[in-house]
Amino acid sequence: MKKIIALALLAVAIGAVVGIRYAANDEPEYIQSAEIRVGSYLTSDYGLVACGSKKVNDLRWELDCTHQEGGKTFEFAVFPSEKAPYGVARSFYLEAINDDAKQSAEQGLMRYLQINTHAG
């Protein structure tokens, strides 16, 4: 019983920290979703990847993911799905910024994110 309570408290604490992090950065929910999904998909295809997002301006966020061992950096512009020039099946829309991101768009699970590789 003590383990269950400890695990429940740990889950609440982690949720609070994550919530505070996103609230402090004023990150919209679609950014959080993109960071988690892209990080997971890239890790599946390339190995351990760490992702972080930054606000460029009121209309644009960027998501940068770094492959821990291979030195690849994947840079994406992230927008809410309603800004996509075509229908997407999630809360966010991605545009590949650099070559690593463009190459990843056709790999493994990443191809399901409908990443625009011709933007800009």
Image (cartoon, grey):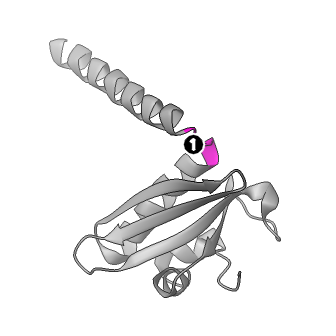
Which quadrant does the C terminus fall into?
bottom right
Query: Residue 77 appears in which quarter of the rendering?
Result: bottom right
Left or right relative to 101: residue 68: left
Query: Dot 1 corresponds to which residue?
Result: 27
Left or right relative to 55: residue 17: left
Identify which residue is drawn at 74% across, 64% down: 88
Q: Amino acid at mark 1?
A: Glu
Disc 1, SS: loop
Q: Is 65 inside the magenta-drawn segment?
A: no
Of 32 and 3, nearer the camera is 32
Residue 101: tell me if it is visible: yes
Left or right relative to 6: residue 102: right
Residue 85 higher or lower than 107, as above or below: above
Which quadrant does the N terminus fall into?
top left
- The image shows residue 94 at horizontal and vertical percentages of 64, 68
- The image shows residue 114 at horizontal and vertical percentages of 66, 73
| Name of the residue lying farthest toward the front | 57
Residue 19 higher or lower than 54, as above or below: above
Left or right relative to 67: residue 56: right
Magenta extent: 26-30
Q: Main secondary structure of the magenta part?
A: loop
Identify which residue is drawn at 28% across, 80% down: 71
Local crowd at mark 1 within 10 Å, few (<14), some, or many (≥20)?
A: some
Query: Residue 82 appears in which quarter of the rendering?
Result: bottom right
- The image shows residue 73 at horizontal and vertical percentages of 39, 76
Of 40 and 94, nearer the camera is 94
Residue 25 higher or lower than 11, as above or below: below
- The image shows residue 67 at horizontal and vertical percentages of 31, 72
Identify which residue is drawn at 58% across, 50% down: 31
Q: Is 29 inside the magenta-drawn segment?
A: yes
